Image (spheres, helix red, strand yellow):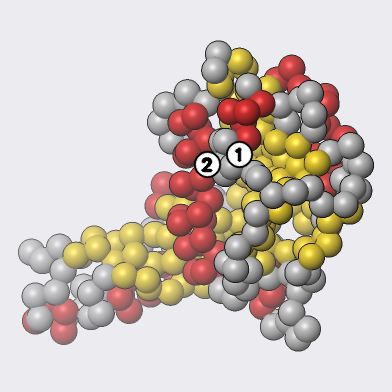
Amino acid sequence: MKTTLLLLVVLLTLPQGDGGRYSKDGLAFDHPAEWKLADTSTPELQRVALTRAGASNLIMVFAQRELIKTAAQLYESRNSVTMPYVLNIAKRLGLSGPPPEQSQCVPVGGLNAVGFRLSGTLEGVPTTAEVYTIVLGQRLLHLVHVRADKDDAAGAAAWKTLLDTLKVEGPAQPPPEGEHIARIVSGGVLNGRAVKKPRPDYPSLAKGARASGVVVVQIVVDEKGEVAEAQAVSGHPLLQPAGVEAARRAKFTPTTLCGKPVKVSGVVTYNFVLQ
């Protein structure tokens, strides 16, 4: 069971770090001395794992080195990194279909890391996997804890220590939007959450050019459900401005996590069909 969990994402073969503390390249956290640490980082990603002899627990921290500077970049990272990773774990746990929406959260550094708690079986053993994301120091972090259910208590202290002590050094001169981005939750496609979604006008110039198709607009919805930011990310150039204008007039159901209203980054789509 333990071997399978270790191979769940990456084969960890590097020697252990010094007990109790990890601090490298701006990423730092504490861990119980009896836990073994392996660092398999790359130029693009810091990747650190903790394991304990005699238990199935696997605790991991993935920290992207590239700074997150925009809400659109955060959304793209969710689509290209977070969701494929979660889907891979769900498949290994024998779960069918897509995972539920992000609904779980844990406190980290005065903010809430949000994510998924998946329960299934691995080699016939009941197993739980937690995957959370958070932006600290303008870097996107994934925090992961996978274990057989029987070892839940064995990893509780190490997991709590990691969450309580995790620190990430930000850039020397962080941009004003840095704190704003850190408080945004990625929400995927938001069409289904709209309580008002005005139909976009069909630009006459686009009609004359026979332009049609889907326009995808990346938006940030504030705590009240109002659209605070809108930016077209795909679609015909003649149709994009109309999609953005319509998105700015939309209104959504406010999102609450951990009992607090949060900003959400996602996309809305508009299909322009020539009549």
Q: Nearer the viewer, residue 11 or 70?
A: 11
The disc label shown at residue 116, or none: 1
Amino acid type, residue under disc 2 in the picture: Val
Q: Position of residue 234 (x, y in %)?
A: 31, 70
Q: Vertically, is 238 above or below 65?
A: below
Q: Vertically, is 146 above or below 69?
A: above
Amino acid type, residue under disc 1 in the picture: Phe
Q: Position of residue 15 (x, y in %)?
A: 75, 49
Structural distance between the alpha carbons of marks 2 and 1: 8 Å
10 Å crowding of disc 1: few (<14), some (14-19), many (20+)? some
* Residue sitting at x 83%, y 26%: 154
Q: Position of residue 155 (x, y in %)?
A: 81, 31
Q: Is residue 195 left or right of residue 234?
A: right
Q: Which of 168 and 102 is in front in this view?
A: 168
- Asked if disc 2 and disc 1 are in contact, CB closer than 8 Å, the reply is yes
Q: Nearer the viewer, residue 153 or 203?
A: 153
* Residue sitting at x 68%, y 70%: 138
